[in-house]
Amino acid sequence: MISPEKKMDLLLSLCKRRGFIYPDSDIYGGFANAWDYGPYGIELKNNIRDAWWKRFVHAREDVVGVDTPIIQHPKVWEASGHLATFSDPLVEDKKTHKRYRLDHLLEAQGVDVSGMSFEQMAAKANEAGLKSPDGNVLAEPKQFNLMFKTFVGVSEDTAATAYLRPETAAGMFTAWKDIRDTMRKKLPFGIAQVGKAFRNEITPGNFIFRTREFEQMEIEYFVKPDQSPAMFEMWLGEMKRWVEDVLKLDPSHVVYKEIPEADRAFYSARTIDVEYHYPFGQKELYGLANRTDYDLSRHQEFSGEDLRWFDEESRERFIPHVIEPTWGLSRTVLAVLCEHLDIDEAETSEEGEKEPRMVLRLPARLAPVKAAVLPLQKKDGLADLGKELAQKIRAAGLVVEYDESGSIGKRYRRQDEIGTPLCFTVDYQSKEDGTVTVRDRDAMTQERVKMDDVVAFIQSKIQ
Ligand code: ATP
C-alpha cells in the first residue's frame, strides 16, 4: 500500500521520467497548470477516447457523433446562460493580491456552502471576518466569469467579442436541428462529442485534475419528456459499467452522489456527481444530469428557429428533454493512473533476491504499449530475430517496443513502469524451436509461445 501523499509524488515523477505528462513550456520555466501529454500519455488518452467512442457511438444504434468549433457564435453563450451565470465567487487578498474561491475558503473554515447563493456566501464571509490563508484582509467578493474572451476578426471592439467554449455540450444543441433533419433517427437518440473545453479557473491545480484547458467526452441524449427518468437510469448504468469494465476502477473508490435540489442548477430535474477517491480527496470525475427542455427551449427562443420534434405517432410537436452524461477525459487519465499505480516486489536474481518494483497495472486495452520484444543478447542473431518479431507485431497494428539495451531486469522494470502488459524475450532456444518466453506484467509468470502465435496471443489479451 502506498500512502496517498506519496502516491501523488510517485505519480508525478513517474509521469515525467517515463514520458506520460511533462510540465508545459518547461524550457521557459513552466506555465502554471499547463501540461504536455508525452508519447505514452497521448497513447493512453487516445486509447481511453477511442474505447469511449467505440462503446457509446459505434456500438449503439441510438448515438451519432459530431465535431463543432471551440469558438461558436457569441449568441450561443447568451442562450445557454453561460454569459450571465457561469461564474465562481472570487475574493482577493488585499496585501498579496492572490485570488481565491470564496466557497473553498468558507469550506476550509468548516462552513457548509451547499445551497448558498453568492450573496449568502458574501454575507457569511463578512459576518465571520474571513481572512485569506495568509491571514490578510480580503477585498469584497466578486462574481468571476470563467469563460475565456477573445476577439474574432481584425478589430478588438465589443462587437467582435467571442468566447472559447467552457464545455462541448453547446455544439450538440446548435447542431441538433441539422441532425434531426438529416439523420433519420427516432427518439430517444443522442449526439456525442469529444473535444477541448476552456475555463479560466480561479484555483486550478492537483496536477491535471483542474486545468484551464481540458478535454470532455459528452452525450446529449434527447428523449420524450416521460422517458427521462428511465433514460437517466439507463445512462447511470452505462456510466457504472464504463468505470468498472473498461477503466477497471475498484467500485469502492467511486461514489455516485445524488445532488439535492437546492444545489442543482434550477433547470435540472436530477443530477448525480460521480466522484473518485483521488489521492488528494474524493472529487468529481463525471456528471449526469436531467437537463429537461432547458437548452433547446433557450436556443429556440434566442435563434427564432423551430427546434421542436414532430412525433409521427401522436402527431404532436414538442421540445425533447435531455439527459446529459459527461465524462472528463483528462480527469479519466488521472483517475486511471492513480488507480493502477502500484508497488510490489520482483525477484532480481537467480537466488530469489527481491526489490521493490513500480508497476502501472493498466487494463491491457488502455496500455500505451501492448508488447515489448527483448532479446536476451544482441549477438548470435538474437537481435535480428527480435527485430523481426517486433516488426510482425507492428505490422498487425499493435504498438510494440523493441529494446536490446541494458540488463533484462532493467528492461522489464521500464516496461512495468509504462504499463506494458506483455514482454516477449528472445533467447537461444528461440533459434532452435521458434518459441519465445512471454512474461505477464501482473502475474510475472513466464511461459513459452511460438513466434508465429505471438500476434494472436497479444490480441487475445487486449480484448
Ligand atoms: P468542478 O466542480 O470540479 O469544477 P464542474 O461541476 O464544474 O466540475 P462540469 O461543468 O459538470 O464540471 O464539467 C463536466 C466534466 O468536465 C467534469 O465532470 C470534469 O470531468 C470535467 N472538468 C470540468 N472542469 C475541469 C477542469 N478545470 N479541468 C479538468 N476537467 C474538468
Image (cartoon, rainbow, N blue to C red):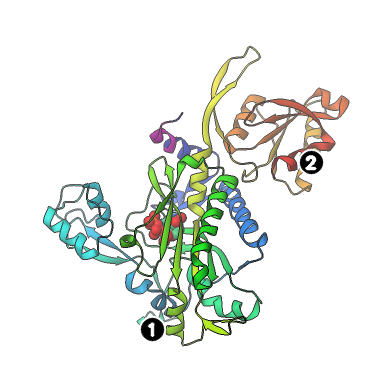
Q: Is residue 5 magenta?
A: yes
Rendered location of residue 315, percent (x, y): 58, 85
Residue at the far bottom in the pictured view: 304
In this view, the residue in front, 249 or 343, is 249
User: Residue at horizontal 35%, vertical 81%?
Assistant: 158
Q: State the residue position of label 1.
A: 159
Q: Is residue 373 above or below residue 63?
A: above
Q: Is residue 325 above or below residue 379?
A: below
The majority secondary structure of the magenta stretch comes to helix
Q: Closer to the observer: label 2 or label 1?
A: 2
Of the image marks 2 and 1, the number of the one nearer the N terminus:
1
Q: Is residue 302 above or below residue 453?
A: below
User: Residue at horizontal 42%, vertical 74%?
Assistant: 294
Give residue 426's quadrant in the image: top right
Label 2: how many Cα within 10 Å (few below 14, some 14–19, many 20+): few
Which mark identifies residue 456?
A: 2
Q: Quadrant of the C terminus?
A: top right
Numbered range of the magenta stretch: 3-8
User: Residue at horizontal 72%, vertical 46%?
Assistant: 398
Give residue 429's quadrant in the image: top right
Helix, strand or loop at disc 1? Answer: helix
Q: Is residue 180 left or right of residue 259?
A: right
Residue at the far top in the pictured view: 351
Q: Name the amino acid type tagged 2.
A: Ala
The answer to whether one can see residue 308 in this image is no
Rendered location of residue 53, percent (x, y): 62, 59
Mark 2 CB near ligand 1 (8 Å cut): no
Residue at the far right in the pictured view: 432
